[in-house]
Image (cartoon, rainbow, N blue to C red):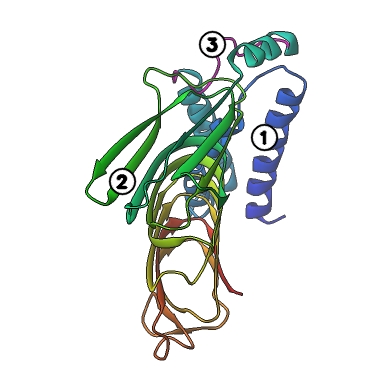
């Protein structure tokens, strides 16, 4: 039997045992805890390619996993202070901290540029739909509440939405939030996400810039052609990133990835890490995408 088969077999067994214990409420952790373990993948890959005996690799693997679990256990806000509890106690905690929230900001016809900065943390987030207000925000879950800070200067509005201070996250995190934006201003989006699922249908908005900093995330973005030049910057850890762009818009992609898979059908490679669409030299409208990621899946689709 090949040594690498034994090595990865042990990894699968240990992972299966971990989830088995969670499903029967013997131990308790959240999906956010798992997402934050993505650097462990690098450690395990490094161990697997070391020129040492299989027994040594297995010992190093067990030590790495135990060390990671100890860090999680003693880190506030990741594991619950009662890791060995029953379903009833967890449900009571969940119900006690569950809340809904919504707010909006009126739209001023003189507003030409709007910036939305959002500290998402973890959960499921969506930006889609039209509103006559500048924006509408609603959320439900056991994270929050959020607070909104508005700064108005001439014809520009800056919106920053963050969690209120002194919040500790623990247990099964459930957080779902949705934005609807006004389609008239020129938008800039700045999202700081952790372990999150982000879906944005921006096809009806005039989007000048998108900046996303994330950890282990699923990111799905649909862009439109209402802006002549759009810049997209994505910096993530172990993530899946999918971006849809119109066929009538030119696109340039610069990637800086490690152990990642890319799908760029319809693009031509013009540099070491640079790709351009076939209509890049002929189209007036352009989308520029910069991806900095590790252990990720990256896909750009023309529609």
Q: Residue furthest bottom?
A: 282
How crowded pointer 3 is (Cα within 10 Å; few <14, some 14-19, many 20+) is rated as: some
Residue under label 1 = 14
Residue under label 2 = 157
How crowded pointer 1 is (Cα within 10 Å; few <14, some 14-19, many 20+) is rated as: some
Label 2 residue SS? strand
Q: Is residue 79 magenta?
A: yes
Where does the image place residue 29, in percent across and percent down from the top left?
61, 24
Q: Up-down: is 34 above or below 112? A: above
Label 3 residue SS? loop
The span picked out in magenta is: 75-86
How crowded pointer 2 is (Cα within 10 Å; few <14, some 14-19, many 20+) is rated as: many
Q: Is residue 211 visible?
A: yes
Using the rendered view, name the quadrant where residue 256 is placed.
bottom left
Q: Residue furthest left?
A: 154
Q: Is residue 59 visible?
A: no
Numbered disc in front, either 3 or 2: 2
Residue under label 3 = 81
Disc 3 to disc 2, C-alpha distance = 42 Å
Disc 2 to disc 1, C-alpha distance = 51 Å
């Amino acid at each position: 039997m090949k040594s690498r088969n034994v090595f990865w077999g042990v990894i699968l067994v240990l992972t299966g045992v971990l989830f088995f214990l969670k499903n029967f409420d013997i131990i308790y952790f959240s999906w956010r805890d798992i997402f934050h373990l993505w650097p462990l993948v690098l450690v395990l890959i490094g161990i697997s390619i070391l020129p040492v005996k299989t027994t040594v690799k297995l010992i190093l693997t067990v030590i790495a996993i135990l060390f990671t679990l100890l860090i999680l256990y003693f880190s506030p806000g990741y594991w619950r202070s009662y890791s060995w509890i029953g379903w009833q106690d967890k449900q009571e905690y969940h119900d006690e901290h569950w809340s809904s929230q919504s707010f909006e900001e009126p739209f001023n016809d003189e507003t030409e540029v709007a910036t939305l900065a959002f500290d998402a943390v973890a959960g499921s987030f969506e930006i889609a739909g039209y509103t006559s207000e500048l924006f509408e925000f609603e959320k439900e879950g056991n994270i929050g509440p959020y607070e909104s800070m508005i700064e108005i200067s001439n014809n520009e509005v800056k919106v920053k939405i963050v969690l209120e201070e002194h919040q500790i996250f623990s247990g099964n995190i459930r957080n779902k939030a949705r934005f609807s934006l006004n389609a008239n201003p020129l938008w800039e989006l700045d999202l700081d996400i952790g372990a999150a699922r982000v879906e944005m249908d921006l096809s009806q908005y005039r989007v000048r810039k998108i900046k996303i900093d994330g950890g282990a995330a699923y990111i799905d973005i649909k862009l439109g052609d209402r802006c002549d030049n759009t810049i997209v910057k994505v910096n993530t850890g172990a993530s899946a990133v999918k971006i849809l762009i119109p066929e009538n818009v030119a696109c340039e992609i610069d990637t800086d990835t490690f152990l990642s898979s890319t799908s760029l059908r319809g693009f031509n490679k013009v540099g070491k890490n640079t790709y351009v669409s076939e209509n890049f030299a002929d189209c007036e409208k352009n989308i520029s995408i910069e991806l900095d990621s590790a252990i990720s899946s990256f896909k750009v689709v023309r529609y």
